[in-house]
Amino acid sequence: MDATPDLPRPPRVPVFNMPAVVTASVGILVLIHAVRQVLPDVWDITLLLDLALVPARWTLALDPGRAADVLKAAAASGGSALEVEARKAFAAYLVADPGGMPWTFVTYALLHGSWAHVLLNSVWLAAFGTPVARRCGAWRYGLIAMVSTAAGGFLHVLIDPLSTVPLIGASAGVSGLMAAAVRFAFQPVEMAGPAAVPWQRPVPTRLQTIPELLRNRSAVVFLAIWFVTNLLFGLAALPLGLSDSAVAWDAHLGGFVVGFLMLPLVDRLGRR
């Protein structure tokens, strides 16, 4: 006779302990990049031209008289002779067809340059998008990410208006979510049981004010590390050979600032 007690089955633990909207966001980014790997080159280039944000395209759309400046900047760009010729040809293409594409201020976030690029952004999105989604809900999480993405793209165009290098990657939107999470994620939280991963902790109900954040050592250290590493990678990654292309530090900064300032507004909107 079996004397083992009939214990209830333990609850199923999800593989990814994230809100559905964050899981979907990560899945979309990975899926798009996977599909791009099997697309014919012509289709992939067309996708890049239609979805990536190219600063010079907007400069020419708003001021066609700067065509000579765009061509001169492309010719003066660094790199091998083949890269320079490719940029000059692309600049000539933009001058011939300078139409602006408003959707590219958001859609550039859907494309990535490599698997390392998309996976790194996915990790940060999971880490900092999760607390924001849990606090704000799906649509406000999406609003913060989208507006931060557009703000990062806008600042990038303002700072480098003659660039013909397509801007791609979700880093600006992720930076906005990261900044939004800073407003509440570094508050001390009472926990029963073993310590959890930071993005699995209960979400505090109150946002910290800016003076409170400046007195919060953890938040200050995080912000300092973020700004210093972002600036260093933006200015030194290409010269030091750490990246094959320049890092759009300005887009990251624009998304971060907007996400930081936007969360209190979105938070009040949700309470109404």
Image (cartoon, grey):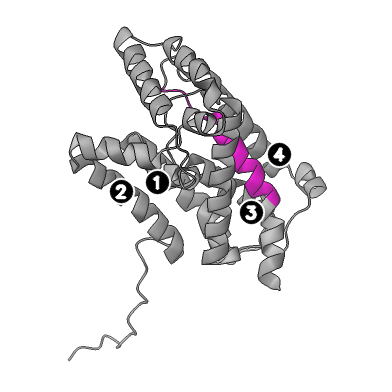
Residue 185: percent from left, percent from top: 63, 54
Residue ID for mark 4:
220
Mark 1 vs mark 4: in front: 1
**Residue farthest to the right, as pictured:** 211
Mark before the other along the chain sequence, 1 or 4: 1
Residue 126 placed where, x, y %? 46, 52
**Image x and y of residue 212, in percent:** 80, 49
Residue at image point 52% right, 16% down: 69
Residue 110: mark in rendering: 1
* Residue at 66%, 38% in the rendered image: 223
Spatial distance from mark 3 to mark 2, Cα to Cα?
30 Å
Label 1: few (<14), some (14–19) or many (≥20) C-alpha neighbours in 10 Å: many
Q: Are marks 2 and 1 in contact (CB under 8 Å)?
A: yes
Look at the image and tell me in which quarter the N terminus lies: bottom left
Looking at the image, is mark 2 or mark 1 earlier in the sequence? 2
Label 2 element class? helix
Residue 126 falls left or right of residue 143: left
* Residue type, label 2: Ile
Circle 3 is placed at which residue position?
A: 185
SS category of the residue bearing label 1: helix
Question: Quick one: 128 or 68, which is closer to the camera?
Answer: 68
x, y percentage for residue 106? 48, 47
Residue of label 2: 32
How far separated are the C-alphas under marks 4 and 2? 36 Å
- The span picked out in magenta is 243-261
Q: Tell which circle, 4 or 2, labels the residue nearer the N-terminal end.
A: 2
Q: Is residue 121 left or right of residue 89?
A: right
